[in-house]
């Protein structure tokens, strides 16, 4: 067994109405996924300001995932369409800055998709882990 | 600085099994702001809640973090506990250490570590929480229904029966909508007038219902519970209160050649007219484009023959302003224009008609008194071809047709074909179809009766061309099941034209800030769970304005919308969600970015005076969120380039603090 296995730090933003409920369902079904994933609840995926994502990377997160309702199912009808456009821009800009595409993800997870939530997180953590630590945006002043 | 209490729940062994709760409570004790930290078997139990209340008192807590199950389970519970202890309920945050921690991680060390981090994030957030109070607004106990078809009538009747006042605004001179033009209705074949006109009369006589016919909504202001609507009552040049509907004026009017829109132009009416015998209100209306008196000041016959003295050539449009608590849109549909479908020769031959025209031709009150006669020569047609899906389900012809299925055409075509064969068994009846869609109660049985009992010949395939040749219409089509071309020399062709929302719906939607889909059907707040509410609070949807519908569906939706309205109007005041957006007027530059993305039209602008350091006063345009309309999605906060817009309960600095706490 490997000692001191590298564990990435993942911040997940989940909209209250679908994805956060999907994460709860994963819990109800005891569908396990890595504990590296820490969820922040937002009312809608469109509440996620790109600066939150930047902040996470700056503070040493290795991957950021945003989960929202499926297109057409957003509790606020159109919020996730804005998210989709905003994040497409942000992710490609981050890519340009050296934050690889695999470190950022936008995923639609409904309240019924507990299994999908867990599977998505397993996959995401694995992909980010393969890339290793994010050093690109990390603000060293933030380190103790 | 806050004084925060942390309460870690064991949830029996649900949490404590894979999270060392004592260690979590200990670790969080040293977080900034935390003055008390403890754990307990069941925080949500009465003794758990009492423990929280005692701690609030003993430690003068200003904020609470509960590390427990999902906030979706017990956030409301702990908010109530906080309230009972004299704290603002929004000073509570939940760290989800069950569903999102103990239940998904098996290792107690890993689980404990994660629980501590989640708790830390919640503490960081509570440090920035502020007490929130939901806004309250009064409710005007009156509803407005826009559109007086069967949808609007049913909604109005249901609301009025519950004891609330309702106004119906109908743009035509009479209520009734499309259903008033229909003959018999599928699937039961009862006559439309027999079931509709009693409802029209009920509406007219209901003491709680006012009908503004020949009227339109000209502006809408306000928000849920408090709309202010201006209604334009168009001049009908007849005093509605005096006119008895006797029709003497109509008989004597010399302008006899005005196309009768109620019969879709298949016969004529006079310049002064009553659309049909059972019109509600049954009063005459003068068509200003046809009346000689109004155009040239010559005539005045109707005024002379009206014994009641109801004619008033000087009448002007009248504007009425009224307040409403709720608005129901019931503007219905119209068949599309077939001008661009040259292949069907609709504009070249009088004997190519639409299905709605067919309804009038078979209606006893129609232009032929219900005898099925060809419009061109009044002869009885021996061979009739019905064409379904004209302009429907047409992904390739978006410039003239519609991509969606109009839903009602399969059924009414089966009805038309069946009724024709029933009344005129000698007539040959063909139906061209792409599919026959009959997913309704007793619908498939109905269609099969047309085929099996009435011998209607269904041909799967499309019609390529219709060519008028002498008295005949040569219909060229394909028969896909037999893989051959067919040519039928028909006497009458009936086109099941696609249906679309009423043209006036788009400007109305803008006035109401209600959203529409690309086809101009009103969108519902949620396609599955809130099908009769529009995303705009206080605006509800009834009938075919939301999507193609037959009468049974229209009526169910109409009653559902009424139930929602009754629910709203039964409240004395509306208690809002306090987690709404608000903009810092000192930072706002009035750029409109937020307004553009708000799905609810919650954001408006106002000019604000600012005192400058040099004592001058400058006026600036700043954004203002209406807390009664805002639903708290937060979309605007991200759109705001100046960082002026923020969302209470999920403020930028709160979320940033959570990110920080997690990444520490
Ligand atoms: C040819 C044909 C045959 C049919 N046969 C059947 C059948 O047999 N059985 C069946 O169940 N269904 C049938 N239908 C469907 C049926 O007509 C509809 O389900 C029903 O009319 C929908 O009612 P509605 O009130 O939503 O719309 P509508 O009947 O269209 O009523 C809308 C009303 O709103 C008014 N309005 C529109 N815009 C405004 C505005 N801006 N301001 C004020 N007023 C406005 C209109 O003037 C109209 O009076 C048939 C439809 C067609 C076309
Ligand atoms: S939070 Fe959402 S609903 Fe509220 S004003 Fe902003 S965009 Fe509109
Ligand atoms: S987006 Fe921001 S700056 Fe622009 S109007 Fe709205 S609140 Fe003001
Ligand atoms: S509420 Fe889930 S994405 Fe908008």
Image (tube, rainbow, N blue to C red):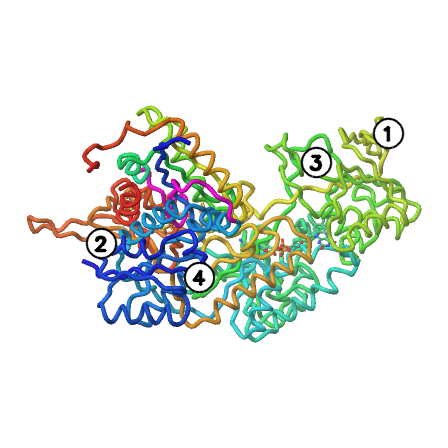
**Residue at numbered disc 3:** B347
In what element is the residue under mark 2? loop
Residue B96, how many percent across, how many down?
39, 53
Upstream in sequence: badge 2 or badge 4: 4
- Please say whether residue B360 is one of the residues in the magenta stretch: no
- In the image, which disc is placed on residue B482? 1
- Mark 2 to mark 4: distance in Å? 25 Å
* Residue most extreme to the front: A1
- State which chain disc 1 sits on: B
Quadrant of the picture in which ligand 3 is shown: top left
Q: Quadrant of residue B597?
A: top left
Query: Are discs 1 and 3 less than 8 Å apart at CB?
Result: no
Residue B488, how many percent across, how many down?
86, 32
- State which chain disc 2 sits on: B
Nearest-to-viewer mark from 1 and 4 = 4
Q: Which of these two is toward me, B252 or B147? A: B147
Q: Which residue: 28% across, 40% down? A: B641
**Residue at numbered disc 2:** B30
- Mark 1 to mark 2: distance in Å? 82 Å
Residue B507 seen from this side: no
Upstream in sequence: badge 3 or badge 4: 4
Q: Which residues are magenta?
A: A30-50
Upstream in sequence: badge 2 or badge 3: 2
């Amino acid at each position: 067994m490997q000692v001191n296995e590298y564990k990435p730090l993942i911040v997940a933003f989940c909209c209250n109405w679908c994805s956060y409920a999907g994460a709860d369902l994963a819990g109800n079904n005891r569908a396990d996924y890595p504990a590296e994933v820490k969820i922040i609840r937002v009312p809608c995926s469109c509440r996620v300001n790109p600066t939150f994502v930047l902040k996470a990377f700056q503070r040493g997160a290795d991957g950021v995932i945003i989960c929202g309702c499926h297109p057409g199912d957003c509790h606020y009808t159109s919020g996730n369409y804005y998210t989709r456009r905003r994040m497409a821009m942000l992710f490609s800009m981050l890519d340009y800055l050296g934050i690889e595409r695999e470190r950022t993800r936008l995923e639609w997870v409904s309240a019924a998709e507990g299994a999908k939530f867990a599977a998505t997180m397993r996959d995401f953590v694995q992909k980010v882990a393969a890339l290793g630590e994010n050093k690109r945006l990390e603000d060293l002043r933030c380190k103790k | 600085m806050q004084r925060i209490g942390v309460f870690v729940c064991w949830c029996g062994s649900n949490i404590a099994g894979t999270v060392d709760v004592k260690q979590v409570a200990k670790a969080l004790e040293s977080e900034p702001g935390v003055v008390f930290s403890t754990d307990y078997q069941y925080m949500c139990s009465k003794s758990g809640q009492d423990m929280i209340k005692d701690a609030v008192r003993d430690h003068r807590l200003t904020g609470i973090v509960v590390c427990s199950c999902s906030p979706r389970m017990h956030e409301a519970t702990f908010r109530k506990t906080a309230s009972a202890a004299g704290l603002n309920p929004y000073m509570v945050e939940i760290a989800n250490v069950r569903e999102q921690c103990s239940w998904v991680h098996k290792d107690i060390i890993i689980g404990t570590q994660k629980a501590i981090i989640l708790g830390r994030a919640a503490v960081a957030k509570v440090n920035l929480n502020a007490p929130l109070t939901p806004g309250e607004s009064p409710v005007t106990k009156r509803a407005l229904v826009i559109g007086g078809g069967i949808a609007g009538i049913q909604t109005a009747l249901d609301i009025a029966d519950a004891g609330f006042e309702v106004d119906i605004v109908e743009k035509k001179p009479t209520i009734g909508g499309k259903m008033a033009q229909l003959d018999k209705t599928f699937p039961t074949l009862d006559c439309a007038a027999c079931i509709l006109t009693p409802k029209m009369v009920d509406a007219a006589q209901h003491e709680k219902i006012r009908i503004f016919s020949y009227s339109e909504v000209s502006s809408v202001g306000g928000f849920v519970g408090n709309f202010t609507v201006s209604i334009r009552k168009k001049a009908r040049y007849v005093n509605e209160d005096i006119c008895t509907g006797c029709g003497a004026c109509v008989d004597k009017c010399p302008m006899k050649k005005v196309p009768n829109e109620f019969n879709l132009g298949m016969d004529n009416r006079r310049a002064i007219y009553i659309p049909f015998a059972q019109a509600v209100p049954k009063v005459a209306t003068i068509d200003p484009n046809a009346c000689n008196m109004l155009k040239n000041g010559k005539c005045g016959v109707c005024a002379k023959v009206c014994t009641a003295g109801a004619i008033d050539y000087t009448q002007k449009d009248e504007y009425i302003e009224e307040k409403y608590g709720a608005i129901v849109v019931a503007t219905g549909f119209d068949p599309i224009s077939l001008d661009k479908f040259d292949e069907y020769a609709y504009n070249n031959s009088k004997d190519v008609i639409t299905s709605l025209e067919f309804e009038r031709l078979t209606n006893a009150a129609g232009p032929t008194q219900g005898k099925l006669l060809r419009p061109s020569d009044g002869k009885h047609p021996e061979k009739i071809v019905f064409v379904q899906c004209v302009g429907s389900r047409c992904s390739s012809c978006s410039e003239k047709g519609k991509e969606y299925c109009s839903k009602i055409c399969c059924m009414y075509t089966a009805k038309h074909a069946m009724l024709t064969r029933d009344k005129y068994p000698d007539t040959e009846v063909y139906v061209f179809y792409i599919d026959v869609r009959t997913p309704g109660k007793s619908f498939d049985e109905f269609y099969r009766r047309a085929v099996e009992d009435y011998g209607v010949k269904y041909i799967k395939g499309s019609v390529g061309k219709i060519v008028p040749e002498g008295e005949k219409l040569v219909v060229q089509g394909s028969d896909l099941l037999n893989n051959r071309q067919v040519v039928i020399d028909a006497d009458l062709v009936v086109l099941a034209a696609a249906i679309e929302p009423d043209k006036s719906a788009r400007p109305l939607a803008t006035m109401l800030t209600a959203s529409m889909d690309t086809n101009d059907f009103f969108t519902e707040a949620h396609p599955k769970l809130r099908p009769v509410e529009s995303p705009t609070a206080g605006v509800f949807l009834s009938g075919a304005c939301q999507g193609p519908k037959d009468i049974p569906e229209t009526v169910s939706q109409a009653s559902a919308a009424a139930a929602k309205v009754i629910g709203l109007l039964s409240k004395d005041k509306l208690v809002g969600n306090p987690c709404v957006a608000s903009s810092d007027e000192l930072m706002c530059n009035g750029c409109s970015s937020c307004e553009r993305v708000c799905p609810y039209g919650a954001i408006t602008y106002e000019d604000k005076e600012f005192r400058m350091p040099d004592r001058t006063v400058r006026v600036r345009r700043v954004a203002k969120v209406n807390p009664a309309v805002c639903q708290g999605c937060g979309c605007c906060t991200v759109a705001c380039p100046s960082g002026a817009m923020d969302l209470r309960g999920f403020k930028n600095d709160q979320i940033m603090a959570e990110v920080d706490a997690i990444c520490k």
